[in-house]
Image (cartoon, helix red, strand yellow):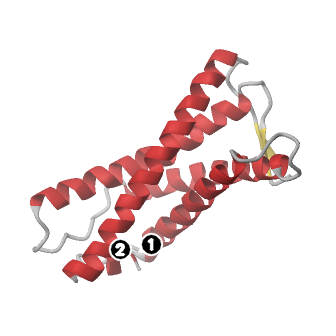
C-alpha cells in the first residue's frame, strides 16, 4: 500500500475522495443552512447533520494527513513548470490546514455553550472548552471565513485538475482516479 512514481495507492485515493465528498457536502449543507431561519422545519435537522458530518470530516481528514505524512508522492510531470509545482504544494498544504481548521472552529461554535455534539445518535463528542460567548463569536467568524477560503481552494484545485486533464493532457488527475 505505497504510492509509486506514477500514481497514488488505493488507501490514499479512498481517503482523498472520502474527504472531497465530505467537504463538498458540508459546504453545500452550510450554504443551505444559512438561508434557513430558526423556525424552518429543516433548520435543526440540517444543523445536526452538519455537525456530525463535520466531526466525521475532521477524523477522516486527520487520518488522511497522518497517512500522507512522510509518504512518497508521485513525481509531477516533467512538463510541469516550477511555479505550478510550488502552487500545487501550497494548495495541498492549504487544503490539509482547512481539513483541520474548519471542523475545529465548527466544533468550538457548537460546543461553546457547554453541550457536546451528537454523532448520528450513536454517541456524543463532549464539549471540552469552558462556555464562552466571546470564543463562540470568534469561532463563528473564523468558521465562516475559513469555509469560504476552502471553497476558493477547492475550486482552484478542481480547475487545476481540469487544466491538467484537458489542456496539458499530462495525466496528473489520473494519478488520483
Q: Is residue 40 above or below residue 80?
A: above
How dense is the environment of label 2, judged by Cα within 10 Å: few (below 14), some, or many (20 and up)?
many
**Residue at x-position 81% and y-position 54%:** 120
**Residue at x-position 22% and y-position 79%:** 167
Q: How many marks?
A: 2
**Residue at x-position 61% and y-position 31%:** 140
Front one among 44 and 31:
31
Q: Which residue is mark 1?
A: 13
Measured as percent of width and height from the top left, residue 22 is found at 59, 60
Q: Is 22 situated left or right of 72 in this image?
A: right
Contact between labelled residues 2 and 1, with CB atoms less than 8 Å apart = yes
Q: Is residue 33 above or below residue 156?
A: above
Measured as percent of width and height from the top left, residue 11 is found at 47, 71
Per the image, label 2 sits on a secondary structure element best described as loop
Sequence-wise, the earlier of marks 1 and 2 is: 2
Q: Is 112 situated left or right of 95 in this image?
A: right
Per the image, label 1 sits on a secondary structure element best described as helix
Looking at the rendered image, the quarter that the N terminus falls into is bottom left
Q: Which residue is mark 2?
A: 8
How dense is the environment of label 1, judged by Cα within 10 Å: few (below 14), some, or many (20 and up)?
some
Measured as percent of width and height from the top left, residue 114 is found at 78, 25
Amino acid at each position: 500500500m505505497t504510492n509509486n512514481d506514477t500514481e497514488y495507492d488505493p488507501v490514499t485515493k479512498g481517503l482523498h475522495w472520502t474527504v472531497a465528498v465530505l467537504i463538498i457536502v458540508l459546504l453545500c449543507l452550510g450554504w443551505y443552512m444559512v438561508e434557513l431561519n430558526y423556525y424552518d422545519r429543516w433548520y435543526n435537522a440540517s444543523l445536526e447533520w452538519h455537525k456530525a458530518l463535520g466531526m466525521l470530516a475532521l477524523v477522516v481528514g486527520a487520518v488522511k494527513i497522518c497517512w500522507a505524512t512522510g509518504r512518497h508522492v508521485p513525481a509531477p510531470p516533467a512538463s510541469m513548470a516550477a511555479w505550478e509545482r510550488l502552487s500545487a504544494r501550497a494548495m495541498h498544504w492549504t487544503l490539509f490546514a482547512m481539513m483541520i481548521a474548519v471542523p475545529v472552529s465548527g466544533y468550538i461554535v457548537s460546543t461553546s455553550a457547554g453541550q457536546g455534539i451528537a454523532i448520528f445518535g450513536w454517541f456524543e463528542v463532549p464539549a471540552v472548552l469552558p462556555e464562552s460567548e466571546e470564543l463562540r463569536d470568534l469561532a463563528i467568524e473564523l468558521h465562516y471565513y475559513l469555509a469560504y477560503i476552502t471553497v476558493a481552494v477547492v475550486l482552484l484545485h478542481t480547475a487545476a485538475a481540469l487544466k491538467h486533464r484537458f489542456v496539458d493532457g499530462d495525466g496528473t488527475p489520473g494519478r488520483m482516479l
